[in-house]
């Protein structure tokens, strides 16, 4: 089923974990038993945000807007726009082991080649963004390399989630999931995982007119406890007069 407020169980010191199984089908009972008795090490991540009970009073069923509207007391929807308290966040998950992330390699400065002088003139200080259609970034991909180590005593599978937070702006959300990779690690071992970030697709936002834009400035990548900043700037030398 869907998420409900289970704060009573989460805050109970006698409850160490909660299994959410959804609708697991006829083999669900055996699968849940395998997790509870340690035959299987769980590696799933929540595909939605679990809100507290009072969130429902702030979100009318007729309001489908994603972005928050403080003037109306509307908190927004999903992890991308909602900033209030949660019972469990999107992407939360537990394991019988622990994992550590170390950033191995990632770019810090990226130039966006513009297609014309018109594109430069339309990169205004008001919006501080560039239309995706005004850049040659379709094939521009950034490689982020992360070392993942199983620091526990149990073999386990880890889902590496990469979130991006764009520069603050009237169209920008809190963050969005832009990449993920699943890796299996025996106890004590380490592997390097590469995530490819396509600038046009993953680091852009949509404005109120439905136009996809790339905010200029600092984009923060969040990988577990890691935070890495990438500065995006327009490449004036590439403009064709």
Image (tube, helix red, strand yellow):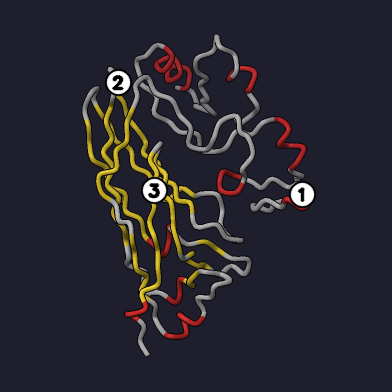
55 lies above or below 156: below
Query: Residue 211, how many percent across, how many down?
Result: 55, 70
In the displayed structure image, the side of residue 153 where residue 178 appears, left or right? right
Q: Secondary structure at mark 1?
A: loop
Check disc 3: other Cα within 10 Å, few if <14, some if 14-19, many if 20+. some
Where residue 157 sits: x, y (%)?
32, 29
Q: Nearer the viewer, residue 183 or 84?
A: 84
Foreground tag (3 vs 2): 2
The C terminus appears in which quarter of the rendering? bottom left
Instruction: Sort mark 2 into few (<14), some (14-19) or many (20+) by Cα contacts within 10 Å.
Output: some
Q: Is residue 217 above or below residue 115?
A: above
Front position among marks 1 and 3: 3
Against 71, is 152 above or below?
above
What whole-number distance in Å separates the C-alpha atoms at marks 1 and 3? Answer: 32 Å
Q: Residue at x 32, y 65 (%)?
A: 140
Q: Quadrant of the N terminus?
A: top right
In terms of sequence position, does the residue under pointer 2 or pointer 1 come before the other? 1
* Among the two numbered marks 1 and 3 on one chain, the one whose residue lies closer to the N terminus: 1
What residue lies at 22% left-to-right and 36% top-to-bottom? 191
Identify the residue under disc 3: 179
Q: Would you place residue 186 above or below residue 110 in this image?
A: above
Q: Secondary structure at mark 2?
A: loop
> How packed is label 1: few (under 14 Cα within 10 Å), some, or many (20 or more)?
few
Mark 2 sits on what residue? 152
Q: Which residue is mark 1?
A: 62
The quarter holding residue 137 reads bottom left
2 or 1: mark nearer the eye: 2
* Residue 109 image position (x, y, % from top left): 33, 61
């Amino acid at each position: 089923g869907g998420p409900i407020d289970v704060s009573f169980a989460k805050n109970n010191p006698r409850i160490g974990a909660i299994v959410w199984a959804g609708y697991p089908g006829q083999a669900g009972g055996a699968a849940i038993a395998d997790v509870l008795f340690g035959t299987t090490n769980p590696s799933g991540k929540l595909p939605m945000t679990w809100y507290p009970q009072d969130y429902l009073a702030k979100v009318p069923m007729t309001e489908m807007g994603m972005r928050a509207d403080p003037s109306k007391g509307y908190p927004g929807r999903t992890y991308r726009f909602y900033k209030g308290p949660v019972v469990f966040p999107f992407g939360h998950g537990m394991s019988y082991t622990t994992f550590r992330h170390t950033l191995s390699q990632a770019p810090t400065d990226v130039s966006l080649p513009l297609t014309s002088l018109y594109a430069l003139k339309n990169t205004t200080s008001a919006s501080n963004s560039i239309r995706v259609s005004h850049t040659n970034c379709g094939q521009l991909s950034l490689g982020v390399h992360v070392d993942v180590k199983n620091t526990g005593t149990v073999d386990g599978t880890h889902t590496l989630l990469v979130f991006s937070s764009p520069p603050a702006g009237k169209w920008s959300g809190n963050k969005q999931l832009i990449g993920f990779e699943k890796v299996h690690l025996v106890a004590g071992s380490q592997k390097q995982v590469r995530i490819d970030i396509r600038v046009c697709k993953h680091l852009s936002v949509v404005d109120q007119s439905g136009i996809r834009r790339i905010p200029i400035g600092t984009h923060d990548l969040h990988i577990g406890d890691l935070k890495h900043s990438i500065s995006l700037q327009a490449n004036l030398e590439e403009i064709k007069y």
